[in-house]
Amino acid sequence: MPTKNSFHIAVLPGDGIGIDVTAEAVRVLRAVEAKLGGFTLTTTTHESGAICYKRTGEDLPADTLDACRRADAVLLGAMGHPDIRKPDGTELTPQVTLRVKLDLYAGVRPCKLYAGAQTPLVDTKPGDIDFVILREQTEGLFASLQAGILLHDQVATDTLVMTRRGIERICEFAFCLAQEGTSSRPPRASPSVTCVDKANIFKSYAFFRKVFDEVAAAYPSIRKQHAYIDAMALHLVQKPARFDVIVTENMFGDILSDLGAGLIGGMGMAPSADIGDDHAVFQPAHGTAPDIAGKGIANPIAAILSAGMMLDWLGRRHDHRDLRRGGELIEQAVMDILANGNTLPVDQGGSASTQQVGGAIAERLGTLS
Ligand code: ATP
C-alpha cells in the first residue's frame, strides 16, 4: 500500500505558448485524477519567466523557487521572450537556473514516434523510433553559463567542465533506465546504452567515455555502444531503430534532443523531464515559440506527455500503482487521438486548436478502461 495519496504540484506556466499548453496538461491531469480516484493532485500556480522579469525584475522569484523545492513535482510550460533580455543582452533562462538550484542533473528526452504523427523520414513507422536521450544538465559546456569571458571585444571563451561525480551519476541513471524502463518504455529484450562524445579530439569527452565504461562494467547484461557526436547526428536520421538509451554531455544533449524531436513530428510532440535525486521538473522540450504565441494553435501533446511522465515518476518514487497507471492512460489517450486523426493539432497536419486537442485527449481518457 502506498503511504501517500496526496501530491502537491507546483505549476509554472511561464511565457508564450507555455501558458496555453500548461493549461491543457493540467486539464488532462484533472481527468486522470477523476478517472482513477486513488490519489489527489493539489496544484498551485507560480510566476516566473520573461514577463515576470519585466514586471518584477526577477525571472525566478524566491517564493516560486521555494514552492518548487516544497512541491512533490513541478510542471513547467516554457520561459523566455526574444525581446525581453538582461542588461548584457542575453536571454532569460530561469528553467536552466531551476536545474542548477534543484540539482536536476538528468534531462530525460524520450523520442517515440506515434501513429498519426508527422515524421519527415520516409518508410518509417511507429516502433522504428523509440529511443531516449539522457542529457547531463549541471555541467558540460553549460557550466560556464553567465561566467564566460569576453576580452576587449576581441576574444571570447566558455569553459567545458566534466567531473567524475557528474559523469558517474548521469551514466548510472542511463543504465538504470535501460534496465528498468518506464510505463511508456518497458525495458527492451536486448537493452543498450550509447555514449555520445567527441573522445577522439577532446580530453573532457575522453574522460566522459572512460567513466561511462567504468559504470557500464557494473551492468554486464546491457550492451554498451559508443558514437561520436557528428556520426550520431547521421545515425539518428538513418538508423534510429538501433538506439535505446543515449547518454551525453549537456550541449550535445541539447542539440541531439531537437534533432530527435524533429524525427517524431517536431517540438510539439517532444516531452521531457529534468530529474535529480530529490526533485523533478516536467516540461515540453519546446520553448515559448513566439511565432505562434497567442494564436491558440500550439500543440499541447508534448506538455501533456510530460505530465504523464510526471505521474510515472511520482508513481515509482512513492510506489503508487494508480499514479503509474495514470501515466499509462495519458499516453494511451494521446495515441488514440493521434491515430483517430479527427482532432489533430496544426503542426501534425490538422486544424484543431490547443484547447480542442487538450479537450479531446481529456475526454478520450475518461472513456478508457
Ligand atoms: P527556445 O530558444 O527556448 O528553444 P524557440 O522559440 O527558439 O525557443 P521553440 O519554442 O522550441 O524554439 O520552437 C521552435 C519552433 O517550433 C517554433 O518557432 C514553432 O514554430 C515550433 N513549435 C514549438 N513548439 C510548438 C508547439 N507546441 N506546437 C507547435 N509548434 C511548435
Image (cartoon, grey):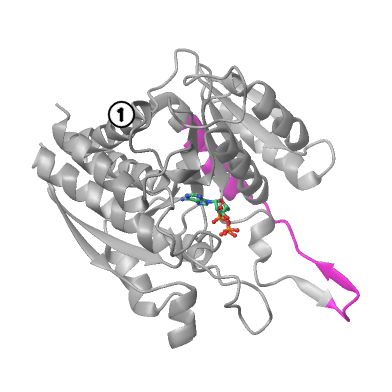
Left or right for 63, reference 160 = left
In the drawing, does residue 124 fall left or right of residue 293?
A: right
Q: Quadrant of residue 217 in the image?
A: top right
Q: Is residue 254 left or right of residue 311?
A: right
- Whether 154 is among the magenta residues is yes
Q: Which residue is mark 1?
A: 336
Task: Please provide percent x and percent y for residue 331.
Answer: 32, 34
Q: Amino acid at mark 1?
A: Asp
Q: Which residues are magenta?
A: 151-176
Query: Which one is in front, 350 or 57?
Result: 350
Q: Is residue 304 magenta?
A: no
The residue that appears at 68% across and 35% down in the rendered structure is 196
Q: Please tell me in which quarter of the rendered image ligand 1 is found.
A: bottom right
Residue that appears at 31% across and 62% down: 11
Eyeballing the image, is 63 above or below 141?
below
Instruction: From the top left corner, tell me how far across and down residue 280 is, in percent.
Output: 38, 53
Q: Secondary structure at mark 1?
A: helix
